[in-house]
Image (cartoon, rainbow, N blue to C red):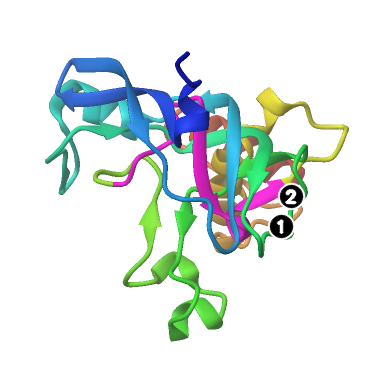
Amino acid sequence: MSLAPHARNQTRAAVLHAAGDIRVEDVELPPLTGDAVRVAVDAVGVCGSDLHYFASGRNGANVLRRPTVLGHEAAGTVVAAGPQAATPVGTRVAVEPAVGCGGCAYCRAGDYNVCPDGTCLGSPPTHGAFAEHVVVPDRAVHPLPDSIDTELGALVEPLAVAVWAVRRADVRPGHRVLVTGAGPIGLLVAQVAAAA
């Protein structure tokens, strides 16, 4: 009798081997140690960066050098947890794709987005969320309230990008705002600016 992929510490995933070459394969998951959690992925957004990798094997200066699972806008349910994880199994979560090392001066100051040893899901060579499961540190999952369904939870990451842009622009009541570009981020920025 063969074990299900997740029982073998593997998951089924869409693996990009080269521009235009995606294959569904089993890939190894990191071990569930420390504060790691395994998330059953229920929804993933397709970002422009994913489309660039698929079309040309690169996104700006970052080049696909080995087969990689893309996808970084994800939400799902915690199905297993390491011994130090605080998020209970069964919790629906949005997955934060940028993960700092957790120990450097930047991470300790809360600036893990500039951690020199950080990774980002779906940014080669780090496997992402176009998979049945991902394993991430507990600090990278954020419980979803009952009022947000899991599919909508996959939009938390791009919404966070829009909120940050509006905050950096210091948009306030009465300001006029021009958003150039009507892709997903541009549309979210317009909505956040209107709300601000």
Mark 1 or 2, which is nearer the eye? 2
Pinpoint residue 36: horizontal percent, then vertical percent.
Answer: 56, 55
Q: Residue at x 60, y 30 (%)?
A: 40
Marking on residue 26: none
Q: Is residue 132 magenta?
A: yes
Residue at image point 45% right, 16% down: 2
Q: Secondary structure at mark 1?
A: loop
Q: Say above or below: 22 vs 91.
A: above
Query: Would residue 189 be visible to someone looking at this image?
Result: no
Circle 1: residue type:
Arg
Q: Residue 60, located in which quarter of the rendered image?
A: top left
Q: CA distance from mark 1 to mark 2?
A: 6 Å
Q: Which residue is labeled 1 in the image? A: 172
Q: Report the residue marked by disc 2.
A: 196
Q: Quadrant of residue 144?
A: top right
- At 56% across and 30% down in the image, what residue appears? 187
Question: Residue 13, position in %: x, y?
Answer: 38, 23
Q: Which residues are magenta?
A: 126-142
Q: Are marks 1 and 2 in contact (CB under 8 Å)?
A: yes
Q: Does 5 appear above or below 74?
A: above
Of 180 and 123, nearer the camera is 123
Q: Nearer the viewer, residue 80 or 62?
A: 80
Mark 2 falls on what kind of element?
loop
Image height of 66 relative to 183, above or below: below
Q: Who comes first in sequence, dot 1 or dot 2?
A: 1
Q: Residues within 10 Å of mark 2 (few under 14, many from 20)?
A: some
